[in-house]
Amino acid sequence: MITVLHNPAATRFEASVDGLLSVADYALRDRVMTLHHTFVPTALRGRGVAAALVQEALAHARAQGLKVEPSCSYVASYMRRHPETQDLHA
């Protein structure tokens, strides 16, 4: 189980796994959340951490009535693989 927390002061979503911090950074402007960077330490890659971060960010956007601009290649790829997120696309 990966717990993702929203840190609005840092404009990012965070997950701490095995003492290592992973993040999905965003910017918010005119009701559009631009997800511009995801980072997962090498030791955690392949464990679904990035997917959990993006899933939580998109759920937050949906709950807040925001659109999403995926400027991060991972987020863009995630949204292409999950057609249920297409309505969020800015």
Image (cartoon, helix red, strand yellow):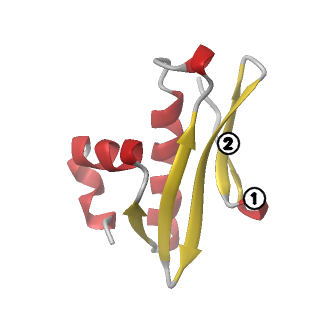
Left/right of residue 49 with respect to residue 71 in the rendered view: right
Amino acid, disc 2: Glu
Q: Amino acid at mark 1?
A: Ala
Say which residue label 2 marks.
14
Dot 1, crowdedness within 10 Å: few (<14), some or many (≥20)?
Answer: few
Residue neighbourhood size for the residue with mark 2, other residues' Cα within 10 Å, grouped as few (<14), some (14–19), many (≥20): many
Residue 45 vertical position relative to residue 72 in the rendered view, above or below? above
Residue 78 image-quadrant placement: top left
Q: Which mark is residue 65?
A: none
Against 18, residue 79 (above or below) is: below
Q: Nearer the viewer, residue 36 or 12?
A: 36
Asked which quadrant contains residue 17, the reply is top right
Residue holding disc 1 = 10
Left or right: residue 89 versus residue 23 is: left
Q: Residue at x 54, y 43 (%)?
A: 38
**x and y, in percent, of residue 52 in the image:** 50, 36
Q: Position of residue 90 (x, y in %)?
A: 33, 72
Mark 2–mark 1 CB contact (< 8 Å): yes
* Separation of marks 2 and 1 at Cα, in angstroms: 10 Å
Q: Quadrant of the N terminus?
A: top right
